[in-house]
Amino acid sequence: MIRLICDPEQVKHSIVNLTPGQSHYLSRVMRRRSGSTVEIHIPSIGRYVGEVLSASQVQMVRKLPEIAPLSAYVILYQALLKQGHFAEVVERATEAGVSEFVPLVTERALVRSVSPQNLARWKTIAREASEQSQRNLVPVIHPDVGADALVLPPDVTGLLLDPDGLPLISYFRGLKFDLTPRIALAVGPEGGFSDGDREHLIQAGMTPVSLGPQIFRAVNAGAFAAVVILTLLQHA
Amino acid sequence: MIRLICDPEQVKHSIVNLTPGQSHYLSRVMRRRSGSTVEIHIPSIGRYVGEVLSASQVQMVRKLPEIAPLSAYVILYQALLKQGHFAEVVERATEAGVSEFVPLVTERALVRSVSPQNLARWKTIAREASEQSQRNLVPVIHPDVGADALVLPPDVTGLLLDPDGLPLISYFRGLKFDLTPRIALAVGPEGGFSDGDREHLIQAGMTPVSLGPQIFRAVNAGAFAAVVILTLLQHA
């Protein structure tokens, strides 16, 4: 079933007013006419079966059971990458289960800031990937921050992906969390973090961890690490 | 360092005779001239530092330490996918740590056989992805097989990725393997396995397992599952 994520403000008297983007997607791209059914997800309110009334309106018909929550709230501090690769990270890592993105400016990076156009594009990609992979939220994408100026929120467990780090499975063994853990995960650019970056991130409270002897491309590493973390924490 | 995976037959008196593809990559794409160094990996023989002699020959100079082996030998039974998506699976899953691929023909699949051209292309992609991600082998790509005709080798643990399956972390908890485990992992096409496919695969000896509540795209699911399996088995 087609799935649309909507804000509470879009709903009035059980009728959802679609955004122009959603309306275009529903009627032009997916060619759904009035009478067909879609799934409407309103984060922190619920999931509903909806009936298409017109190209711009959907009637909420009945509530669906909640989607099981993920085992951790992962914030990906992803180093900026060349070309369109950050967009690929947003798509793949949203699907993998990342809940927030912080673009990280690293020492060796050629890309040193995020344009408003790119930020807007990444937000669209995050929303579409959320809808396709049945996430119960749309990941937030933050403004960029320098690796040398990073301050972690006080309630997170900070991890830094590093081939020489502690194996992730050893790191989590025996750890217990009372609430859903919040994990801040830093992933480097092509060629990895510089020694300077690594030092800054460790100073900020991140522990180097590794997934194994494989060498991952920067575009995949964050998604791979997120899936592993979310699996390892399923029974922590 | 540039890394080339070579067959033992390419080596004579510590001189490696490059294939036309390797030669093109080294001299044209990467523009390495005589005197520059590369890494030569000869599976089941070893890794060497090599010095470029000419566009077609490399002198082996000294042996490098072995790359740590992966925790499992994963054979991915991947359902054939639309368009070029199987090629993406080969690239991403090789990087993730898959060691063999078996293209699987499923009930709902539009693509029902593998052309010799595609098979050749996938083998090239597997080789390149191996070189880039420092795998110590080039994954084998087998001819296609029908999900209804699948026979698993006797020494494998068969798993079938299924949103309703047993959580993978529960499946592996407490399991001990004397040797490096051989895992046969089946991943469905877009839209998932049909009930018929699932029944055939379970009959063939596969157990349905799940990675969590996320819905993964067919193009990513195999790579994600492989990384998780290889992590979970690191200390099994």
Image (cartoon, coloured by chain):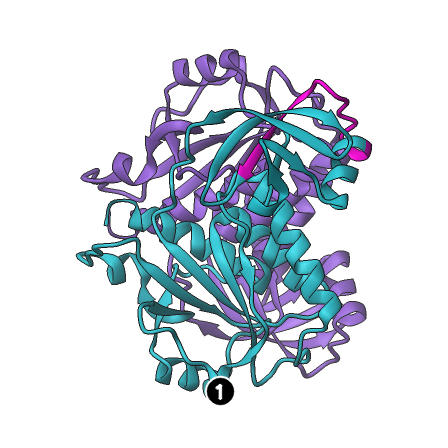
Chain colours: A cyan, B purple
Left or right, residue B172 beside residue A117: left
- The x and y percentages for residue A74 are 42, 58
Residue drawn at point x = 57 percent, y = 74 percent: A191
Residue B73 to residue A2: above or below: below
Left or right, residue B214 beside residue A138: left
Residue B213 to residue A140: above or below: above
A40 falls in the magenta region: yes
Residue drawn at point x = 79 percent, y = 27 percent: A31
Q: Which quadrant holds residue B67? A: bottom left
- The x and y percentages for residue B87 are 67, 42
Q: Which quadrant holds residue A213? A: bottom left
| Disc 1 element | helix
The answer for which chain carries disc 1 is A
Residue B132 to residue B216: above or below: below
Residue A163 to residue B161: above or below: below
Left or right, residue A26 beside residue A203: right
Could you classify mark 1 by the number of other residues whose Cα lies within 10 Å: few (under 14), some (14-19), or many (20 or more)? some
Residue drawn at point x = 76 percent, y = 30 percent: A30
Identify the residue under disc 1: A148
Q: Is residue B160 visible?
A: no
B195 falls in the magenta region: no
Residue at the extreme front: A13
Residue drawn at point x = 63 percent, y = 80 percent: A109
Magenta region, residue range = A28-41
Query: Which quarter of the rendering shows the N terminus of chain A?
Result: top right
